[in-house]
Amino acid sequence: MTLRLFSTVFACLAPLAAQDMPVPDGQGRLLRLFDLDRALPAAEPAELAAGVAQRPASWDASIAGLLRAHVEPPLGAGDDLTVLGGRWLALLGRPAQIASLERLLDHAAAHREALVDTATHVVRMPATTFDRMLRPKLVARTDAAGKVLGFETVVPAANAAALLAEVTQATGAEVVTAPRLLSSPLQRCSLQIVRQIPFVKDFELERQGDRLVAEPIVETTWDGVQSDLCAVLLADGLIAVHCDVRTQTVVEPIAEFTTDLGTGVPVTIQLPRTSGVHLRQTAHLAPGDLAVLAAQRADGDYLVTLISATLQDPAADANGPR
């Protein structure tokens, strides 16, 4: 079992001075560029700030998707938000949408020294216990066809501690993991508690003289929990917590079958079977609130994730209560 913790800084962002370019689409859209490097967080490596190092390849899509969820009115057909060249955030939208994103980025830049303390509990719970104790308190999330994908809610601070104790101490419940992460706003924190499991996926035939030799192709699957968290500070004092939790279980022993690839020697190929749960939620939390999301596992049990977040903000402390 390995424990790995790593983070990717998204950056506390500051916009350029207003430089809107009209778009000749007849819809009144404008194009605005924001400079993501104008206000890097203190934790940003100096090499990255100087352009010596590069952000991960997934950074562009991640930060665009994260901020897209907070543009008001929501982006629709013909609107777009993307990162260009790893530095420039481009918003194609209407004036109200541009003003919305500008307020969000101004607020982020003003609180660039803040830290978000996020506590996460991942709990495995028997179906009978979930149905009796937790399901009545949650709201079902469904797809377009009405199929239930999971359950979620936000519990007010006055009831949060009691519910957390009730879930973690319930009969048959197992706390899978309970990490506590301290991060900057707009910083993605990833936690993996996984066991890497190698398996022989296939064989590659290689001729050696007058013989064919089968060389194994080894790949790796994983068993455990992976979670990604990112917090965004909102101007109304709430913290928007983006949570993505995956669990995966590998059926062991791994299924195998033996075949002959024409080498005269039997070879064994492994076919791992996995089952898992993927939970995703964006919750707007006041201090002390508790976000709850749950989904059913393949074995019938439920995976329940409970998240709370508090803000440590030197700017707010210096100016008094907000």
Image (cartoon, rainbow, N blue to C red):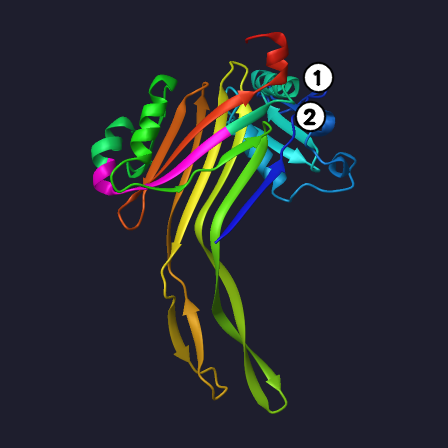
Where is residue 122 drawn, in percent x and y? 39, 39
Q: What x and y, as percent, mark residue 238?
A: 49, 18
**Tag 2 and tag 1, C-beta contact below 8 Å:** no
Q: Main secondary structure of the magenta part?
A: strand
The x and y percentages for residue 78 are 55, 29
The image quarter in which residue 257 lies: bottom left
Estimate how packed mark 2 is, as few (under 14), some (14 to 19) or many (20 or more) residues with alpha carbons within 10 Å. Answer: many
Q: Indicate the amino acid at tag 1.
A: Ala
- Give yes or no for residue 156 being in the magenta stretch: no
Q: Residue at x 79, y 35 (%)?
A: 50
Amino acid on which the number 2 mark rests in the picture: Leu
Looking at the rendering, the stretch of residues picked out in magenta corresponds to 118-130
Any part of residue 166 in sight: yes
Q: State whether residue 113 is above or below residue 135.
A: above
> To which quarter of the image does residue 157 belong?
top left
Neighbours of disc 1 within 10 Å: few (<14), some (14-19), many (20+) = few
Q: Is residue 312 left or right of residue 247?
A: right
- Residue where numbered disc 2 is placed: 33
**Which of the labelled discs sits on residue 18, or is there none?**
1
Where disc 2 sits, the SS reads: strand
Q: Is residue 112 above or below residue 44?
A: above
Looking at the figure, which quarter contains the C terminus?
top right
Secondary structure of the residue carrying tag 1 is loop
Please tell me which residue lies in front, 19 or 236.
236
Q: Is residue 148 left or right of residue 78?
A: left
What's the residue at 48%, 25% (across, down)?
309
